């Protein structure tokens, strides 16, 4: 087969990607060349800005995902062209249609008539010589169908009825293989049809959680992802029946008109027109049967499309929440008391020093049934004194509020210590405790105590601790069990990689889990780095990484800028400046002194380093080791509010956003049940995405609209001038309100960079001078 240039060349793909991303084709080509050569997204985003025109990690991730789809589409085109040409049926017109197909569904529509398939009724009818009968009745509807069919009765066709059935099968298949008809009907159903659901007979009681969908219909193209996944879950549970319809059957006249429009499209393809002739009734029935067959096929296609769109959005929301949690403000290297609450089994206690090392553990029993309150306070006070504890981290599970009370009294009894406490999510702590990684890190601790260690560490540094846990167990996703595991895992792994590399990693203290997420490292090299560190002591220079087994020049290029070596012989090793740029960094320092921003950076531009990289170097030299995460703050839950029944409409409370979904945000106000702030109650303006207003881990002030202890539902609002209503807003998410004035939600603090006492650039310059490097 002769090559089709615009199919086999990447130029068309680059142009399309550039148009979709709103960038230039040369930027796309440069990025693709780097990625194809083995560079990672974080490395390209941070250290190859000149090459890509400063494409960021989000753009690069979108490019990478879309590139994968387009290349798969390109490969499928080639396979289809080869297949059709081998059949001797490839025409210039068909070749052009295949070249112009922009989606996999359109490509498969074109290929459908040429697919190798099992013998169909239509194929059997053709072999019996019935295609001329079908063509005759379409070409001359004045013929009497029964009489005309009688001419085709043979040994293989016993009677006229069989002949007509065979002729109809041929026409039905002909209509069902018309690519243009399938494409147009699919799009019309997507934008004008309805996905309808109804409850299965006898399933009303057990399916109450799907009650909103017992009688439900909505246009597929307008359905939010959470609703699609809920409907499919209800169907999988055997509670709901789903169907794609041309219109609303309850509107008989409108439904009939809608179906007629589709049937007319089929008639046009088959070149059938009704005029009261003998064959017209038979042909009309053929059109109706053809449409029913097409509708069944398109219903499956649209269900796949609905799920794919819903999955994409669900994964996007999950990824955004995970990013927020991983980049939450760290408390830093302060000694922390971790409390894993429990009632009968007691409160598990762990003291973790500033490096994250567990230095003491205990179990206290302040709650029922033992109620050893004073003994628990005494034990905790001794740990605070002995280890100079500064922070208390309390898990948010069972007995969390009771344990929070215990901590409050402890703080009151020790005012001189100026202790701070914070309730943190313990999602995934039990998963970590029982993992092989926890066994390796904490071999001498009982599984039950490891959770307290994890709770303390995730307050000190959420990113470093949470990377040890399967992201699906962190508790920030919605409908994660309804989406394709591979797609979710790929997206979440990308988020973790971007977050880890945005913050940077201390190569001398990082766990293998954290190191494995650094660009260019991975699980094998992370273990090798730790093994080399254990055998030879701490790294004193970045260049020593090249001594790690199997860490070659390419891996070093990718990872070096993200790995930090503090207190070593090379001061720049503690910064995000890449080793390849040390020379220009020293020139900038030697000429800039303490006024780096006043330098004319154009004088440093050469063939290797342009202004984007030079500006990054200056920003880093001004604040080396700067942490991009926000400042650490805490929320204060209201005393006396411990369970849903304590909540009263109109109450204003502090809360912590625990999860953000497409329809709103869940907020922990300290009653063991998160409340929902519906998207319509988030701002005094229209918002399409809750992430525009809040993020996971953010401290907000909310007002209670309604609390329903029986249904365990709490309706909240961020608009503090809202009045409580009778019906919880979270019970009717399909009717969002966006038209009322409101107060702006109180954010935890603007995401200013946290600067954990790094040396000033003058100190960096001094260090360089002492090392003889400037």
Image (cartoon, grey):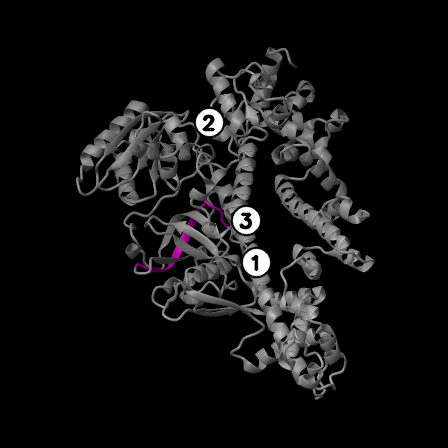
Q: Where residue 206 sits: x, y (%)?
A: 34, 64
* Label whose residue precedes the other's in the sequence (1 or 3): 1
Q: What is the CA distance from the residue labelled 2 to the residue labelled 1? A: 41 Å
The answer to which of 146 and 4 lies nearer the viewer is 146
Q: Is residue 357 one of those drawn in magenta?
A: no
Q: Where residue 682 sits: x, y (%)?
A: 48, 56
Q: Mark 3 packing: few (<14 Cα in 10 Å), some, or many (20+)? A: some
Q: Is residue 696 one of those drawn in magenta?
A: yes
Q: Where residue 703 sits: x, y (%)?
A: 39, 56
What residue is at 63 percent from the left and 11 percent from the top? Answer: 772
Q: Mark 1 packing: few (<14 Cα in 10 Å), some, or many (20+)? A: few
The answer to which of 319 and 338 lies nearer the viewer is 319
Q: Which of marks 1 and 3 is in front?
A: 1
Which residue is identified by label 1? 304
* Label whose residue precedes the other's in the sequence (2 or 3): 3
Query: Does 509 sit left or right of 596 as displayed?
Result: left
Secondary structure under tag 1 reads: helix
Q: Where residue 429 sits: x, y (%)?
A: 37, 38
Which residue is identified by label 2? 511
Considering only vertical position in the picture, is 288 above or below 113?
below
Residue 380 figure quarter: top left
Which residue is identified by label 3? 316
Q: Is residue 680 visible?
A: no
What residue is at 41 percent from the left and 50 percent from the top? Answer: 667
Question: Start and end of the magenta stretch?
Answer: 694-709
* Label whose residue precedes the other's in the sequence (2 or 1): 1
Q: Which of marks 2 and 1 is in front?
A: 1
């Amino acid at each position: 087969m002769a090559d089709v240039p615009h199919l086999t060349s990447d130029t068309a793909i680059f142009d399309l990607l550039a148009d979709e991303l709103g960038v230039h084709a040369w930027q796309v080509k440069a990025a693709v060349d780097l990625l194809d050569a083995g560079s990672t997204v974080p490395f390209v985003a941070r250290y190859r800005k000149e090459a890509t025109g400063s494409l960021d990690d989000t753009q690069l991730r979108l490019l990478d995902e879309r590139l994968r789809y387009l290349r798969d589409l390109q490969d499928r085109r080639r396979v289809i062209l080869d297949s059709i040409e081998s059949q001797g049926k490839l025409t210039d017109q068909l070749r052009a249609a295949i070249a112009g197909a922009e989606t996999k569904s359109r490509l498969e529509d074109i290929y459908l008539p040429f697919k190798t398939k099992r013998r169909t009724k239509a194929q059997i009818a053709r072999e019996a010589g019935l295609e001329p009968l079908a063509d005759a009745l379409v070409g001359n509807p004045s013929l009497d169908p029964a009489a005309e069919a009688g001419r085709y009765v043979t040994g293989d066709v016993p009677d006229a009825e069989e002949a007509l059935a065979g002729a109809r099968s041929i026409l039905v298949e002909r209509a069902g293989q018309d690519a243009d008809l399938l494409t147009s009907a699919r799009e019309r159903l997507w934008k004008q049809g309805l996905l309808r659901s109804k409850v299965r007979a006898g399933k009303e009681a057990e399916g109450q959680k799907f009650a909103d969908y017992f009688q439900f219909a909505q246009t597929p193209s307008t359905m939010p992802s959470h609703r699609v996944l809920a409907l499919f879950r209800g169907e999988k549970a055997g509670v709901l029946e789903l169907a794609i319809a041309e219109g609303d059957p309850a509107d008989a006249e409108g439904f009939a008109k809608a179906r007629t429009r589709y049937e007319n499209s089929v008639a046009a393809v088959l070149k059938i027109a009704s005029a009261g002739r003998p064959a017209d009734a038979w042909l009309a029935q053929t059109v109706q049967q053809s449409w029913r067959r097409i509708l069944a096929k398109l219903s499956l296609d649209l269900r796949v499309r609905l799920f794919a769109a819903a999955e994409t959005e669900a994964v996007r929301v999950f990824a955004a929440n995970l990013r927020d949690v991983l980049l939450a403000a760290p408390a830093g290297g302060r000694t922390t008391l971790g409390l894993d609450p429990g009632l009968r089994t007691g409160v598990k206690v762990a003291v973790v020093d500033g490096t994250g090392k567990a230095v003491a553990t205990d179990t206290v029993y302040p709650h029922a049934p033992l109620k050893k309150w004073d003994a628990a306070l005494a034990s905790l006070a001794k740990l605070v004194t002995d280890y100079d504890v500064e922070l208390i981290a309390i898990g948010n599970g069972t007995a969390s509020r009771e344990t929070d009370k215990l901590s409050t009294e402890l703080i009151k009894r020790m005012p001189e210590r100026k202790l701070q406490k914070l309730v943190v999510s313990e999602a995934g702590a039990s998963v970590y405790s029982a993992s092989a990684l926890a066994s390796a890190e904490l071999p001498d601790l009982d599984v039950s105590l490891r959770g307290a260690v994890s709770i303390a560490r995730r307050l000190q540094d959420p990113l470093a601790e949470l990377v040890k846990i399967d992201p699906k167990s962190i508790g920030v996703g919605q409908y994660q069990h309804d989406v394709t595991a591979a797609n979710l895992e790929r997206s979440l792994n990308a988020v973790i990689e971007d977050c880890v590399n945005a913050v940077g990693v201390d190569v001398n203290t990082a766990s293998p889990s954290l190191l494995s997420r650094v660009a260019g490292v991975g699980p094998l090299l992370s273990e090798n780095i730790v093994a080399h560190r254990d055998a030879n002591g701490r790294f004193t220079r970045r260049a020593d990484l090249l001594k790690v087994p199997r860490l070659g020049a390419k891996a070093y290029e990718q990872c070096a800028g993200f790995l930090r070596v503090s207190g070593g012989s090379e001061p720049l090793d503690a910064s995000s400046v890449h080793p390849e740029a040390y020379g220009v960094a020293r020139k900038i320092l030697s000429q800039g002194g303490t006024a780096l921003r006043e330098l004319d950076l154009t004088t440093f531009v050469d063939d290797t380093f342009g202004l984007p990289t030079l500006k990054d170097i200056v920003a880093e030299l001004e604040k080396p080791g700067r942490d991009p995460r926000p400042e650490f703050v805490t929320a204060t839950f209201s005393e006396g509010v411990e369970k849903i029944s304590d909540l009263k409409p109109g109450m204003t409370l502090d809360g912590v956003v625990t999860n953000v979904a497409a329809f709103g945000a869940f907020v922990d106000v300290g009653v063991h049940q998160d409340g929902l702030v519906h998207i319509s109650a988030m701002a005094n303006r229209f918002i399409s995405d809750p992430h525009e207003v809040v993020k996971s881990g953010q401290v907000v002030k909310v007002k209670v609209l309604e609390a329903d202890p029986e249904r365990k539902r709490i309706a909240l609002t961020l608009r503090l001038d809202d009045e409580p209503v009778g019906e919880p807003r979270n019970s009717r998410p399909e009717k969002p309100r966006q038209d009322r004035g409101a107060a702006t939600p109180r954010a935890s603090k603007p995401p200013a960079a946290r600067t954990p006492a790094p040396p000033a650039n003058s100190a960096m310059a001094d260090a360089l001078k002492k090392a003889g490097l400037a």
